[in-house]
Image: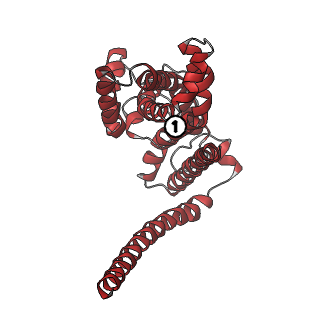
Amino acid sequence: MSTATSLHQSRKRKNAVMMTLCVTAAGIGLAWLALILGALVYKGGAGLSFDVFTQMTPPPGDAGGLLNAIYGSVVMTVIAVIVGTPIGVLAGTYMAEYGRFSKLTTVVRFINDILLSAPSIIIGLFVYELMVRPMGHFSAIAGAVALAILVIPVVVRTTEDMLNLVPNALREAGTAIGAPRWVVIKSVAYRAALSGIVTGILLSIARISGETAPLLFTALNNQFWSSNLNAPMASLPVTIFQFALSPYEEWQQLAWTGALIITLTVLALSIVARSLTGRREDK
């Protein structure tokens, strides 16, 4: 009896130590996150105004806004999502529905994992060699392609995982009534995994919204308003990068404000993604 009691006490002490270490580590992480967010709100909030969303990036020493940079980021992000999402969803569908046990799926999954963890600057250099050098100039379309390559692996992984979670009984029920396989996937599997797939798309948008390195090698930047996809285009991450390194206070303030805008956007997308995931778990 004493041996069992001592063993119980020993496990309780170990559990208390590990719980203390885990809570401490979580507290340290949250403290750094709070410091970063606090600095962004303090520094960037001071520059938030209507002019930020209505005026162009200014010349050195003048006041201005981030309208052209915000527009460029939105345009390239939308194109990247439009291009990357169908490819990612279709690839994930093949891996989960058609080739779940094939060797090709294993190879595709391995390559997708490499792309998922690859530094974004490598993607930028790849698109630079693939598009920018042959074209002879930077362009927004090259930047969108670089971002689309970053979107694809996130959507592939999420789509495959969500479809794998759909019970096979649902597929068998659809097949039992004589529905073709593609109809079962579209009407049964996709509906059951829809919230998870949408979550993956939102997370991919959150990932690419702050990417700077791929755009430095592809879209570069533009101090003026440009809607020409075949020409350099401003983007919020690159503008923040350039303004933050400048000696001008006005530019530095705009860099802080731009960083706050991106952070709030990413946080909003993350909250929406979490809510969709929670709604799916409730069902």
Find residue 203 and report its horizontal and vertical position in percent: 51, 41
| Residue located 31% across and 20% down the image | 104
Q: Give the farthest residue toward the front.
A: 1
Residue 149 against residue 281 in the figure, above or below:
above
Find residue 51 and report its horizontal and vertical position in percent: 68, 47
**Residue 224 appears in the rendering:** no
Which quarter of the figure has residue 99?
Answer: top left
Residue 235 against residue 83 in the figure, above or below:
below
- Report the front residue among 41 and 251: 41
How dense is the environment of label 1, judged by Cα within 10 Å: few (below 14), some, or many (20 and up)? many
Report the quarter where the C terminus lies: top right
Q: Give the farthest residue toward the bottom.
A: 2
Horizontal placement of 106 versus 205: left or right?
A: left
Report the quarter where the N terminus lies: bottom left
Give the amino acid at mark 1.
Answer: Gly
- Report the front residue among 98 and 31: 98
| Residue located 50% across and 47% down the image | 60
Q: How many marks do you count on the picture?
A: 1
Residue 268 against residue 37 in the figure, above or below:
above
**Residue 205 appears in the rendering:** yes
Residue 250 against residue 83 in the figure, above or below:
below
Find residue 145 and report its horizontal and vertical position in percent: 44, 24
Find residue 63 and report its horizontal and vertical position in percent: 60, 50
Residue underneath mark 1: 200
Q: Say which element carries label 1.
A: helix
